[in-house]
Image (cartoon, helix red, strand yellow):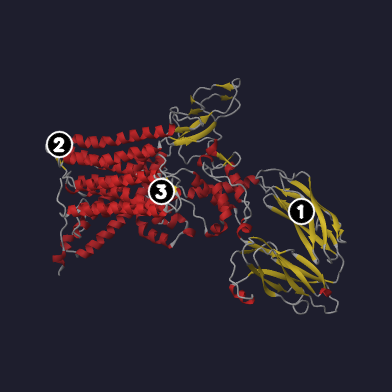
Amino acid sequence: MSNETEYEYCGDGLLLPLLNEEEKRWNQSFRAVLYLFALLYCFLGVAIIADVFMSAIEVITSKTRKIYLARPSSPTTGVWRPGLAKVGDAAVEEGKGTSSNGTDHAGSKDPGGSLQDASEEPEVVEVRVWNDTVANLTLMALGSSAPEILLSVIELSGRSFEAGDLGPGTIVGSAAFNLLIITAVCVVGVPDGETRRIKGIKVFGVTTIFSLFAYAWLLVILVAVTPDVVDIWEAALTLLFFPLLVILAYMADKTWKCCGASALGFGGKKQLELGAGQLTGNSEERMLGGKTFFRNGNLDKDGLVAFVKEVKKYPGLSDEDAALLAASRLVDSQPHSRMWYRIGAVRSFTGGRKTQPKLSLKLQELLDKPLKTVYDTINEHPNAPNIGKLMEPDELRKAVIEFRAATVAVPENVGTFEVTITRRGDLQQRAKVKVESIDGTAQENEDYIPINEIIVFEPNETEKQVKVEIVNDNQWEPDEEFFLKLAIADDDDTSSVKGGEEREEKVQLGRISIMEITILNDDEPGLISFPKRGLLVKETIGTAQITVLRKDGADGEVSVSWRTLDKSAVSGKDYKGGSGVLVFKHTEVSRVIEIPIINDMEAEKDECFEIELFNPTGGAKLGAINRMAITITNDEDFNNVMGHLMSLTNANMDAIRVHRDTWASQIKDAMNVNGGDLENATWGDYLMHFLTFGWKVLFALVPPPGLLGGWPCFFVSLFMIGLITAFVGDIAAIFGCIVHLHDSITAITLVAMGTSLPDTFASKCAAVQEKHADNAIGNITGSNSVNVFLGLGLPWLMGAIYHYSKGNQFSVPVGSLGFSVMVYTCTSLFAVALLLLRRNLSIFGRAELGGPKPLKILSAVILVFLWVLYVFFSILQTYGYINDIF
């Protein structure tokens, strides 16, 4: 068959085709594949520019104003200072505001006045100006629904103000996908055993009623009032339902939050709410004994010091690791909007800069379960538990094996003696280590018999002995030494163990994994003393290791008592002192006293305490140095250390900030995979970065969201969305024509899914990470309502006015649109009923999302089945298999 017979002319769109395909007679199959890939590529472009658009909205809606809280004062010292409107315990500074990316204002001066102690400045906090509900239903809804709304407007304009099928079909199809598919994904996406319940149920109720009413209203004006015609008053009323929705939802939100409190939201718990911001009382802002951690989601030195003080208790964490953890905690402690999750979702599947810190593999290994528990505790979330101090992580989950002493000394004629190996930590499992000897000045076979064997600890066994044989050559020699070394037993080592036991993974070597054995000719019990009179330790060392030596003999078991003596350092405040008895077994010549050092993370002078040895037994005597002074030195330049950590944390936070303030930063992010974080980039990130590179570079030229409050970025990115949407409309129409797919079916399937996929990923992330279901599905009904009121009300009003000016009526055939709306309305009623049942029945967990696994899977299957029915019946009606009931 020739190309001429295969070619089918599909008409011209607003912008496409760019080439004269009729003249070139392109192969239809080639055209179908070409336009399909072009459609998918444009969907990626829409998602990326929508990311920029939402970043601008994030900046706009994050504007804040300062609230001054009067500190407690007595009537005699309190002074009223004019300039602030006092309400309850708070005063609001009018006419000023800062962005959410501003600095901490805890030290700001009072520009006005309030009733307070004249010697004290008021406490200053920041609250957001925009109400969450208003922001969600206006700018945020516009951000997520802009492609669908603009597609409807552009289609009308491109068809000489005649109604088309693609725009309205996309709005209805997107609503069905959002309510049925996204909800199904969120229901099963919640981790097993958990539930997510909508918190703002009054607002959700208002938006749900409006979403059902919106589509019922379409049937009323298209079928009942003026069949197949939309008058100006009908279109205008449809558009006016949008502000009515916002007003009623705002009223429901205020009623839900304030519950009869004053206009600024004061309640019995000293809770202040202004717009979207909430100032929370002590129960939500303070934890761990009244200390503040990252208050209001902002980084401050005190919060960072307290956080680092906790995480530094655990080994293997550098300053960089602590700063990365602090940044991650800051992100987790801040409230996030649905828009934040959508931006993160888009960047995740396009290889862009992430909105959450990526912990390295090294740090992931250090974050074992106990440390993660503390890590998750040190945050400002009001529901976070305080679990207190935990055991050392390694000892809690592993068997720690080491020699009992670091050194022993034996006479050459000792023959065979035993060396003790100890185990602590996990005692429930079998554990084994390898012991081997290493030459020093003493040579194997000449001075000792070499050792290479596997030691097996049975469950609850804490000590094992290794026999060491010394060779007596009856010749005079100076003292000589050799070493015993512990190592984790490899798989190949199991052959030397009777029965070939399975390798035990949960084994870790302790501090004393190498023992020095000295061969000497002395058989005296020896002298016990410290090696020197003083020792310097840093406050951050954790545990000071104090060595005690046994000299001039190592025969027999001896002991010595020890105790700490306070000087300028005080036990319990600067260190954990005490007393005890140190035992040297036969041949042991060195033991260690461990003294925990308390790091109070405060700049202070050096402090000291002493350790005294007394009361030796077993014939041993005290040596010349029986007292040692331990000086605790504050880390050099404490402020520089904390300043360094503050800088690192700020750098981490800046790297994951949603928006950029300069063109240079935007272009740098666009040019680099993962925004420059190559260490954590995956092959998928590289692939998607390559595919979307052109879009990223193009959209990096859009004004930065941080410029002029985000408004230039808002309008330019909105224009770019409209431009790409125009291409989407033309490509979808031509593709549907090529494959003989009606515009209405293309709209409710390909176009609706392509524009809604970013919202699907965002809702899934919100369902997993949030404690409530509001950001996952709470905005779906509101967005569906806005789609109708703006996405159809605005273009229909334009069309009605245009045709009225021409002296005729604006025709909107009810046809496939009316049938699709009717089917969707029926399926949406079932979906809403299912959500109500899930919320109120215990078998579902009394929550919209999650719950028992079989029932959440069943719920998701029902929702997906409803969507399939919607698409299936719409297809049947479009192609004439169902008679037009209208």
Question: Mark 1 or 3, which is nearer the eye?
Answer: 3
Determine the secondary structure under disc 2.
Answer: helix
Determine the secondary structure under disc 3.
Answer: helix
Q: Residue at x 53, y 40 (%)?
A: 295
Q: Earlier in the sequence, mark 3 or mark 2?
A: 2
Residue 535's mark?
1
Answer with the quarter of the image where residue 886 lies: top left
Say which amino acid is labelled 3: Ile
Question: Mark 3 or 2, which is nearer the eye?
Answer: 3
Q: Residues within 10 Å of mark 3 (few under 14, many from 20)?
A: few
Q: Position of residue 716 (x, y in %)?
A: 33, 44
Q: Position of residue 312 (x, y in %)?
A: 62, 51
Q: Which residue is mark 2?
A: 804
Residue at mark 1 to residue at mark 2: CA–CA distance: 95 Å
Residue at mark 1 to residue at mark 3: CA–CA distance: 65 Å
Residue 698 visible within the image:
no
The foreground one among 844 and 667 is 844
Residue 843's mark?
3
Q: Position of residue 323 (x, y in %)?
A: 56, 50
Q: Residue at x 75, y 68 (%)?
A: 419
Q: Earlier in the sequence, mark 1 or mark 3?
A: 1
Residue 870 visible within the image:
yes
Say which amino acid is labelled 1: Leu
Q: Residues within 10 Å of mark 2 (few under 14, many from 20)?
A: some
Query: In the rendered view of the protein, which quadrant contains the N terminus?
Result: bottom left
Taking the image as shown, residue 52 lies to the left or right of residue 827, namely: right
